[in-house]
Image (spheres, helix red, strand yellow):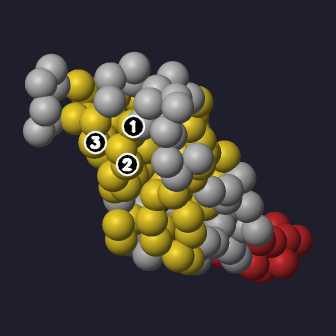
Amino acid sequence: MLLWALFLLMASPLFFTNCSNDPTMDAVPPSFKEVVISPAKPHMGDTVTATVKFMSKGKNWYKMEYKWTLSRYQQEPQYNVKGQGTTIDITEPTFTFVVPDTLGMYTLRVNPGTVSASSLFGNGSPFGNASIENNSVTFTVRAEEE
């Protein structure tokens, strides 16, 4: 019995210490400054690359989902195309789209979704939200010869 009690006394710190595999609450979601397109003045049919630029990278997150919409509402015919994507490994979201064959002013809007973390956010959740200060960019589609 004395041997059993001695074993329990020595083993008790193992049961009450924090495991090193437990997640910590130090994840910070990213924040983004703006959406930038290249080329900035696209022509009909061009492939455009859109990048959502960091304001702050945050920390200990590994994946962010986002949705984007390319629209033209103020002219006929109206145009509305939607897409979505995921960025991995704390990188700025980048995606491509093809410029419509109709001249006019378009707006590209990006909305951040769920951010997944390798540790927990301040509220104790493995998921949080990113923010984008200026989540849209407007551009005019030009004819090829312009």
| Spatial CA span between label 2 and label 3 | 6 Å
The answer to whether residue 146 is left or right of residue 77 is right
**Residue at the right extreme of this rendering:** 3
Look at the image and tell me in which quarter the N terminus lies: bottom right
Q: Name the residue beneath numbered marker 3.
A: 105
Q: Which residue is mark 1?
A: 141
Identify the mark at residue 49; answer none if there is no mark: none
Q: Which residue is mark 2?
A: 139
- Secondary structure under tag 1 reads strand
Please give the name of the residue rendered at 53% of the width and 76% of the height, measured from the top-left corner.
55
Percent from the top left, x then y, of residue 138? 33, 52
Residue type indicated by callout 3: Met
Could you tell me the amino acid type at mark 2? Answer: Phe
**Can residue 97 be seen in this snapshot?**
no
Q: Are marks 1 and 2 in contact (CB under 8 Å)?
A: yes
Q: Earlier in the sequence, mark 2 or mark 3?
A: 3
Kindly check if marks 2 and 3 are in contact, taking CB atoms under 8 A apart as contact: yes
